Image (cartoon, grey):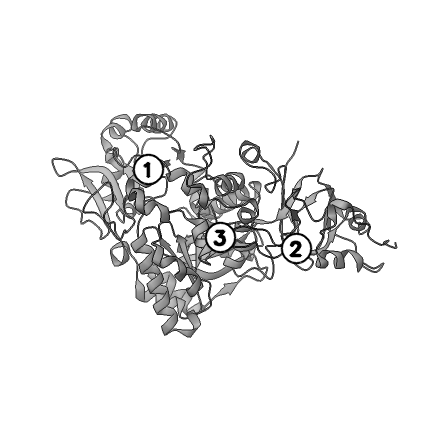
Amino acid sequence: MTIHRLVVRRSLRALLPGVLAACTTVSDTTPAADLILHNGRVYSMAWPEPTVNGVPSAQAPYDSVNGWRHDATAVVVREGRVVFVGNDSAALALKGPTTRVLDLKEHVVLPGLVDAHTHVAELGQSLDRVNLTGVATEAEAVALIAARAATTPKGEWILGYGWDEGAWANRYPDKTLLTARVPDHPVILRSLHGFAAWANERALTLAGITRNTPVPTGGEIRLDAKGEPTGLVLNRAVPLLDNAVPLPTPAQRDAQVLRALHVMAHAGYTGVHEAGVAPDVMDSFERLALRDSLPLRVYAMLSARDSSLIRQWITRGPFTSANGMLSVRAVKAYYDGALGSRGAQLLADYADQPGHRGVSGGSYGFDQRLVADIMSVGFQVGIHAIGDAGNRATLNFIDSVMRAAPKARGLRHRVEHAQVVSPPDLARFASLGVIASVQPPHAVEDKGWAETRLGANRIGGAYAWRTLRQAGAGLVFSSDLPGSDWSPFYGLHSAITRQDTSGTPPGGWYPAQRMTPEEAVRGYTVWSATAGFDETQAGVIAVGKRADLTVMDVDPFRSEGPALLKGRIMTTVSRGRVVYLRTP
């Protein structure tokens, strides 16, 4: 069949040269497609970056009068790769007898979304746990646990997660009510971001936590007036409870991981950066990759808290599975704690707790030698740093390792969260080539108490995405699930509006730090590909790239607020395979 010269409609006049070339070089001998998506609104993202103030490139499909427009309507896939981006007629001409054709009904197509800071193993576990997210009081939480206990055999563990350690910081719960209502099951309830845990008496007994238990450096075991554990532990003491829970079997772990990854596929993601992978989870990823069972690409960041795991990978070196679905070339470390639980290290006292500046470094389990050693053999590092002192020390550490070890340079090292940054340190992100890996939902979730912790002066350097961009820092966006909702619509909404789901505050919380729609989308596509060394394969929709695509029923370039939050994922394509298709 001869394909006639492409006729470009007015709405597509801004098609990129590379896309036009793909449209006009198809020949009669081209093999049939495996998958054709047509009748869509495709944003290829294959145009140059906006300015640091968010002004679109002159080559972007945008004008100041009409705003954004899509730059293609169809995508063709063969053998897991994009082979055509352009108009419908040219795409459908590549249909063969076995081609799968999806009519997108004018839905929006973006490069496959990637959540660049996840804990999918925890998500897999949490799907079986009691969800306490949004629960306002201790009594409400205990009632939910009691309800679960009524249907759980006596003696079995009951696990929950999601109570907000930031919002509850001035009224932390204890074991009294929980033990009274649920005496026959060991219960551990992890907080929203994992920096606190709350247990009943039976769990404390099984964990061996008594009045004489040594307190881990950088942790806290709350004691009552009689010197007995209250059931509440903070920061580096949380593992004392976690370690009492039996590990799942390999089969159970594989099932948890797969379940979580399919949840992510349903949410529109084609990849995740898994932050802080433990040995048994790493084994699961490798088993699933070997069986070609991973529905999404996993960029695994090894847990620096496990020295034997890190030493093993120092010897082994970076790794990518044969099918490209698993990449291991990064490590996750913790420098300080969380702002909500007052564990983040600050340069000056907490505004609401004079004399306290948080916990960090060796006190928080940060092994400088171990992390430096794995960086020195070519691993990227992503270091959790929340407070301004924590961020400064983290930048100092990365700088020192890069100066000493040539193989540690140019590895796009990351600061995970980069939540509070002192003005003198802003430019250092760019000069050191360090990416600020930030979570837009954290800003809208923390806005109710963050300024109380920091005070009016320091809050200006907190959650400061625009300021980081203007300083030349690279950004990447994520959810930090399961501590925050992983819906991409929630993440995009948070980045664009800096408002919560109810639309408050009007105009956004510190609105000067808002991202433009283009920047928000890039944070989950182009920039995530760069942060994971995947830019030659993904991040944009272009001929030769891996066929990772996300289809949604709202246009994030032209919608915000309630309209964006109501968006739905229609189709997720990972490596050319449809891993999720919404049914009517």
Compare residues 148 and 56 and report the one nearer the observer.
56
Mark 1 touching mark 3, by CB under 8 A?
no
Q: On the image, numbered disc 1 is attached to which residue?
A: 449
Q: Looking at the rendering, which quadrant does residue 39 occupy?
A: top right
Mark 2 or mark 1: which is in front?
2
Task: Give me the C-alpha separation between circle 2 and circle 3.
Answer: 23 Å
Mark 1 or mark 3: which is in front?
1
Task: Describe the element under mark 3 as helix, strand or loop.
Answer: strand
Q: Amino acid at mark 1?
A: Trp
Q: Few, some or many C-alpha atoms within 10 Å of disc 1 (few <14, some 14-19, many ≥20)?
A: some
Q: Earlier in the sequence, mark 2 or mark 1?
A: 2
**Residue 6 coordinates in the image, percent (x, y):** 82, 52
Mark 2 or mark 3: which is in front?
2
Is residue 277 at all visible to an observer of this figure? no
Task: Give me the C-alpha separation between circle 1 and circle 3.
Answer: 24 Å
Q: Earlier in the sequence, mark 2 or mark 3?
A: 2
Which residue shows up at 23% across the image and 48% down it? 349
Q: On the image, numbered disc 2 is attached to which residue?
A: 59
Which residue shows up at 52% across the image and 50% down it? 523
Q: On the image, numbered disc 3 is attached to which residue?
A: 476
In the image, is residue 496 above or below residue 141?
A: below
User: In the drawing, does residue 5 fall left or right of residue 281?
Assistant: right
**Residue 291 coordinates in the image, percent (x, y):** 57, 55
Q: Looking at the rendering, which quadrant does residue 24 occupy?
A: bottom right
User: In the drawing, does residue 411 fall left or right of residue 173?
Assistant: right
Task: Describe the element under mark 1 as helix, strand or loop.
Answer: loop
Q: Residue furthest left?
A: 226
Q: Amino acid at mark 3?
A: Val
Q: Looking at the rendering, which quadrant does residue 361 occupy?
A: bottom left
Q: Amino acid at mark 2?
A: Gln
**Residue 318 coordinates in the image, percent (x, y):** 48, 66
